[in-house]
Each structure stands twice: as C-alpha cells, then as structure tokens.
Image: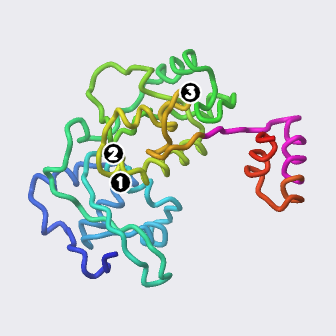
Amino acid sequence: MAKLSDIPKTPAGSLDEAMLALCRGIEAKRARTVIDHILEHGIITNEELNSLYGYDHPPRAIRDVREKGIPLITHRVTSLKTGRRMGAYTFDDRSKIRAGRVGGRKAFPKQFKQALIALYGSRDAITNESLDKRYLQIDHRVPYEVAGDDGGPLDPGDFMLLDASSNRAKSWSCEHCDNFRMKRDSAICRACFWASPENYSHVAETQSRRIELVWSGDEVANFERLQNAAQASGVDISAYIKRRLGK
C-alpha cells in the first residue's frame, strides 16, 4: 500500500490547458468540491471529504467527478489519524477520458420516470417493494461510468427504479467490483444482480445468489418473531432463515 506522501500529486500547475478547461467547466457542487481541492492540493482523501466537507459517503462524491467525465486515479493509503485503509484520489491522464462521458449524466425528462413506472410498476427493482413514486430514483442498469451516454433516445430497458437505500447498496457494490474499476465490460454488468435482479448469473463477478426481503405493515410481527428466534439460536437472522429453509 502506498504512502500518502509518495503519491505523485496533480495540482492545477501539473495539468495541460485542455484538462484544466474540462475541470473548470464542471459546475455540480459535489463534483466541484472534489475538483477544486485536487486542483489546489494535488490530492484528496476519503478522510478529507468527510472531515472537511461533511460527506458521509465520500466515494459518491468521487463518482460524481467521474460521471462528469473527469478521470481519477484511486490510490489505497493508510490514514495517519486512524491507521485505517482509505482511498486517495488524483487526476488521471486526459487520454483516459472516454467517449460519451464529458459533461456527465443528462437530466431525465419529467415524463421519463412515469414511463418507467408504467413499465415496471411503482416499486424498487431490487427489493420489489411497492413504494410511492416520490421515493423512487431513476438509475442506469449498467453504471454510467461503464456504458456512458450515446446521446440517443432514452430506452426504458436501460434503466431501473430504486429507493435511496438500494441505490446506495448498488453504488457500493459497483464501486468495489473489478469490472467497474478496470475492465468496464457492459456485458458483464448486464449479467449482474445489480443490473438485472430478475435474471442474473453473478453478483459483482462473484458466484452468489441474493434475495431481498422487506416486511411491511402487519408482516413486521412475523419479522420480529424470526429475529427473536435467531437471537435465541445465537445466529443472525439471515443465517436463521437459511437454516429454516434448508430443512
């Protein structure tokens, strides 16, 4: 693991004019915060994003920058304060900018969400839980950083509806997947649980199978009975349910 002091920094003075122009053309607040810090200091860490700027999920801010088309290098370092591993980020070479990424995601027309609800129902694609539409967010099935945006008409089949919790879980899993970080193969993404929970062959390139269960309303009492039984057996509720289903 690299030492923070040994990582080559990329402040504004180290960038060519074209890269600087791209950086300075980004207006989104969270991405702008990351970019300005790197332009001034040459590097930013997850710890700084949390302590200086109050971002509880620093990788989301880094993802914002990448979604805007600005390439970043992720370095694994040890925090001098906590001794824990963390991410540190510098600008990558301008040649790493990929077609369809500059300028970032395009805003969705208001009627597009309604079209997705008409197609899929007003439900979270991961948990299949029915929700009021105001709790649902539009998300690319294949992450924007992998597939980009060709500028053509929006295809509802390329998108899914997620609530905030499922969106965070998907983001975390994608950000830690080798395909997302290195290979960027859309076909691998499409075969993943997080893109196609209704028909998938892997979960972030791991041979796993998942099921998301939500207990609501009167069902909560059933969940609490399962939880109490799991605690009495000395296992977590997931292990207890698997044990019961395996009988």
Query: What residue sits right under mark 3 in the picture?
Result: 198
Q: What residue appears at the point 39 percent right and 39 percent down from the top-left corner?
A: 143
Quadrant, the C terminus? top right
Q: Name the one closer to the observer, 85 or 109.
A: 85
**For the residues bearing labels 1 and 2, Cβ distance under 8 angstroms:** yes
Going from N to C along the chain, the mark reached first, 2 or 3, is 2
Region rendered in magenta = 210-228
Residue type at mark 2: give it.
Glu
**Structural distance between the alpha carbons of marks 1 and 2:** 9 Å
**CA distance for labels 3 and 1:** 33 Å
Residue 200: image location, x then y, percent:
50, 32
The tag on residue 31 is 1
Where in the figure is residue 238, as x and y percent of width and height?
A: 73, 49
Q: Quick check: 12 left or right of 126?
A: left
Note whether 200 is above or below 65 in the view shown.
above
Sequence order check, earlier mark of 3 and 1: 1
Which three-letter amino acid code belongs to the residue tagged 1?
A: Ala
Give the quarter of the image for residue 131. top right
